């Protein structure tokens, strides 16, 4: 079962995922989006989850919390499961 199959903290305001649509370094991030995005949205329908693909963009994810606090992690060259682990850590999903 996915660690994302639950509602996130109300303090989380937005998730932004950036990656390159063709670079091998972003492959794990793209696979994460394909497999986990539907689960995240199912359990958090009102949470904005933005996916931005641009050539040459390093893979990373940003989380914006209440009061404008923003955190991010780099995801380049990680597998889909490693990306899921890093994102869960960032979002404090246990």
Image: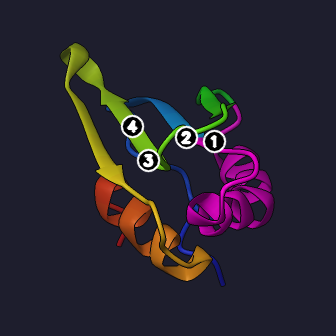
- Residue to which mark 4 is pinned: 62
Q: Answer whether residue 59 is magenta in the image.
A: no
Whichever of labels 2 and 3 marks the residue nearer the N terminus, that label is: 2
Q: How far is disc 3 from disc 4 in space, using C-alphas?
A: 7 Å
Q: Is residue 20 left or right of residue 18?
A: right
- Residue to which mark 1 is pinned: 44
- Residue to which mark 3 is pinned: 60
Q: How far is disc 3 from disc 1 in space, using C-alphas?
A: 21 Å
- Residue to which mark 2 is pinned: 17
Label 4 SS: strand
Residue at x 38% of width, y 44% of height: 9
Residue extent of the magenta highlight: 19-45
Q: How far is disc 2 from disc 1 in space, using C-alphas?
A: 16 Å
Q: How far is disc 4 from disc 2 in space, using C-alphas?
A: 6 Å
Do the CB atoms of the residues marked 4 and 2 lie less than 8 Å apart?
yes
- Could you tell me residue 33's position as x and y percent? 70, 55
Label 2 SS: strand
């Amino acid at each position: 079962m996915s660690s994302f199959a639950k509602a996130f903290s109300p303090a989380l305001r937005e998730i932004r995922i950036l990656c390159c649509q063709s670079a091998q370094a972003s492959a794990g991030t793209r696979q994460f989006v394909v497999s986990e995005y539907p689960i995240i949205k199912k359990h958090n329908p009102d949470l904005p989850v933005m996916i931005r693909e641009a050539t040459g963009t390093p893979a990373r994810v940003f989380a914006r919390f209440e009061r404008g606090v923003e955190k991010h992690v780099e995801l380049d060259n990680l597998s889909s499961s490693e990306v899921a682990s890093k994102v869960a850590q960032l979002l404090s999903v246990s």
